[in-house]
Amino acid sequence: MLTCEQMAELGSDFIDRRLSRRTRLAVLLHVRKCPHCSRYIKQLRLTSQALQALPFDDEPVDSRAILARVHPPQGASH
Ligand SMILES: [Zn+2]
């Protein structure tokens, strides 16, 4: 079972489909049981979709700066 801390690290790789099948499954299982991480993954997905919708494709996107605005799951109390 993954911890919420691991989820925070794996989240963006999960969204970008860079995880192995096994790790991906572990993430899905965690999300199913953990409302905080469920919300976290949803936010990441929305952020990722927003990034893809941006018009400047050929510029490197500073995804770290954008992800930094998404609250990690453990801080999500509201
Ligand atoms: Zn969690």
Image (tube, rainbow, N blue to C red):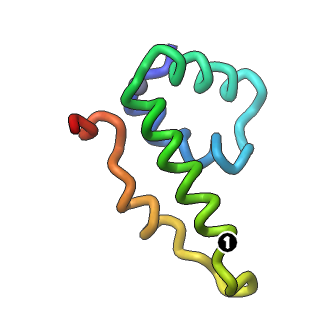
Left of 41 or right of it: where is 17? right
Q: Quadrant for residue 59, please give it.
A: bottom right
- The residue type indicated by label 1 comes to Ala
Residue at the image point whose x is 52% and y is 50% from the top = 44
Front in this rendered view, residue 33 or 4: 33
Front in this rendered view, residue 69 or 54: 54
Q: Check the image and report above or below for 13 versus 22.
A: below
Residue 40, percent from left and from top: 44, 40
Residue that carries the numbered disc 1 in the rendered image: 53
The quadrant of the image that shows the C terminus is: top left
Residue at the image point whose x is 43% and y is 69% from the top = 65
Residue 57, percent from left and from top: 73, 82
Q: Residue furthest right?
A: 21
Residue at the image point whose x is 45% and y is 59% from the top = 67
Q: Check the image and report above or below for 20 versus 50.
A: above
Q: Quadrant of ligand 1?
A: top left
Q: Quadrant for residue 25, please give it.
A: top right
Looking at the rendered structure, the number of numbered marks drawn on it comes to: 1
- Assess disc 1: are there few (<14), some (14-19) or many (≥20) residues with their C-alpha within 10 Å of its C-alpha: few
Residue 16, percent from left and from top: 69, 50
Residue at the image point whose x is 37% and y is 30% from the top = 36
Q: Check the image and report above or below for 35 versus 57.
A: above
Left of 46 or right of it: where is 73? left
Left of 28 or right of it: where is 73? left
Callout 1 secondary element = helix
Q: Check the image and report above or below for 77 versus 13.
A: above
Residue 34, percent from left and from top: 42, 20
Front in this rendered view, residue 4 or 33: 33
